[in-house]
Image (tube, rainbow, N blue to C red):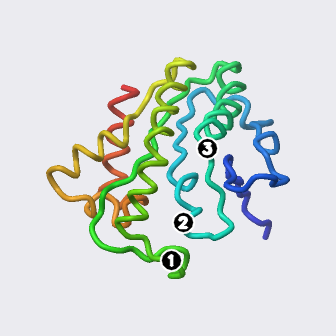
């Protein structure tokens, strides 16, 4: 049985990696994409707190990488929908990295400080490329005010079924 096709990540957290966006440009079957939604989540933020060799991606580098992704897509006429990264203010400590790290309030505070300028960069790129913008961080902040953050993302990062449903409903409203 052939191995299933797996797409590699578009953003890498370590400098000097041999893999780049150019390795993952849309080709062949992917060139005829007419509408594409992109969510670069918090995996590009915070990993330096889990891995001592982790790399903090400056907002300029994040923006440049995102721009390299968007430029050829926009040039090909692809309708772009950018989804803000988000981080919910959950309570308590979460184990991450197969239980090798504990993420608490201090780590999430550091992640938020790194995330906010990147959210702004996504907003600016949406303006630059005329893309639709799903303001997921804002949406979750509003939802959290009435239900609590763990309902939407147990660890503050990965949506629960309710969180996925909220994102899907917001996406459908945006493109309707």
First of labels 1, 2 by sequence position = 2
Quarter placement of the N terminus: bottom right
x, y percent for residue 31: 73, 31
Q: Nearer the viewer, residue 19 or 102?
A: 102
Per the image, label 1 sits on a secondary structure element best described as strand
Per the image, label 2 sits on a secondary structure element best described as helix
Which residue shows up at 54% across the image and 81% down it? 100
Crowding at mark 2 (Cα within 10 Å: few <14, some 14-19, many 20+): some
| Residue under label 2 | 49
Q: Hey, which quadrant is residue 54 in on the image?
A: bottom right
The x and y percentages for residue 116 are: 43, 42
The crowding category of the residue bearing disc 3, from other C-alpha atoms within 10 Å (few below 14, some 14 to 19, many at least 20), is some
Rendered view: 36 above or below 74: below
Estimate how packed mark 1 is, as few (under 14), some (14 to 19) or many (20 or more) residues with alpha carbons within 10 Å.
Answer: some
Q: Secondary structure at mark 3?
A: loop
**Which quadrant would residue 93 be assigned to in this image?**
bottom left
Q: Position of residue 32 (x, y in %)?
A: 69, 28
Q: Nearer the viewer, mark 1 or mark 2?
A: 2
| Distance Cα–Cα, label 3 vs label 1 | 23 Å
Q: In the orientation shown, which residue stands out farthest toward the bottom?
A: 99
Q: Which residue is mark 1?
A: 101
Marks 1 and 2 sit apart, C-alpha to C-alpha, by 9 Å
Determine whether, in the image, residue 18 is placed left or right of residue 60.
right
């Amino acid at each position: 049985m052939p191995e299933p096709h797996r797409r590699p990540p578009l953003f890498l957290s370590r400098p000097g990696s041999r893999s780049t966006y150019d390795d993952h440009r849309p080709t062949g079957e992917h060139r005829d994409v007419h509408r594409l939604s992109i969510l670069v989540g918090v995996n590009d933020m915070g990993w330096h707190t889990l891995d001592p060799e982790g790399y903090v991606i400056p907002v300029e580098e994040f923006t440049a990488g995102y721009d390299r992704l968007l430029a050829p897509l926009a040039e090909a006429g692809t309708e772009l929908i950018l989804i803000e990264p988000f981080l919910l203010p959950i309570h308590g400590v979460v184990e991450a990295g197969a239980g090798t790290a504990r993420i608490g309030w201090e780590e999430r505070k550091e992640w938020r400080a790194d995330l906010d300028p990147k959210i702004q960069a996504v907003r600016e790129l949406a303006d630059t490329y005329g893309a639709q913008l799903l303001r997921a961080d804002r949406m979750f902040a509003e939802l959290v005010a009435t239900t609590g953050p763990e309902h939407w993302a147990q660890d503050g990062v990965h949506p629960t079924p309710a969180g996925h449903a909220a994102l899907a409903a917001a996406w459908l409203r945006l493109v309707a």
